[in-house]
Amino acid sequence: MADKQFPSLDRLIQHANRVSGRKPDSVELLARMIALATDDGADPYLVLGVLIEGAVRTLDKHIPSERQAEATEQLRQLLAERLRARGLA
C-alpha cells in the first residue's frame, strides 16, 4: 500500500525492492547492520556521518550524472519527510 504522505519514501522502497530482487538480501543486510551498530552502542554521530557519506558517495559514483540533480533533490525531500514524521523537524 502506497503512503501518499511520503512519495519519496515510496519511490525509494520500490527502487530498493527492485535492486534487492537482483541482489538478494543486500539492502536488508545493510539495514540490519545499521540497526546492529546503533543498538550495539556505536557513536550515533559517527554512524550519521557514515550514512551521509554513503549517500553522497552513492549519488556521486552510482547515479548517472544526468539523474544526479533529481536524485539529490529526492534525497533532500526524503530526509525532510522522515524527520517530520519522527517529530524532528
Image (cartoon, grey):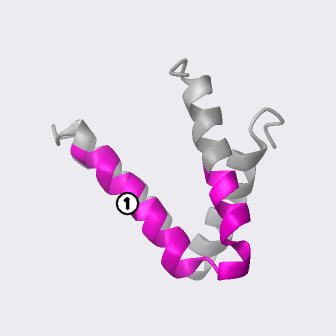
The x, y position of residue 30, in whole percent, is 39, 61
The amino acid type found where label 1 is placed reads Glu
Q: In screen coordinates, is 2 left or right of 33?
A: right
Image: 24 above or below 73: below
Q: Residue at x 17, y 42 (%)?
A: 42
What's drawn in magenta, residue-wise? 46-75
Q: Residues within 10 Å of mark 1 (few under 14, many from 20)?
A: few
Secondary structure beneath dot 1 equals helix
The vertical placement of 86 against 19, above or below, is above
Query: Camera-side residue: 10 or 44?
Result: 44
Residue 58 drawn at (x, y percent): 49, 71
Please report the residue visible at 61 percent of the width from the left and 76 percent of the height from the top.
63
Work out whether residue 47 or residue 73 is closer to the camera in this orientation and state it: 73
Is-magenta flag for residue 33?
no
Decide whether residue 50 is among the magenta residues: yes
Q: Left of 45 or right of it: where is 29?
A: right
Q: Quadrant of residue 89?
A: top right
Say if residue 24 shows up in the picture. no
The residue depicted at 67 percent of the width and 63 percent of the height is 71
Of 14 and 21, the residue lying toward us: 14
- The quadrant the N terminus occupies is top right
Instruction: Please count the marks in the image.
Output: 1
For residue 50, above or below residue 7: below
* Residue carrying label 1: 53
Residue situated furthest top in the rendering = 87
| Residue 8 on image: x %, y % | 72, 48
Residue 85 can be seen in this image: yes
Q: In percent of the image, x 73 and y 79: which residue is there?
A: 66
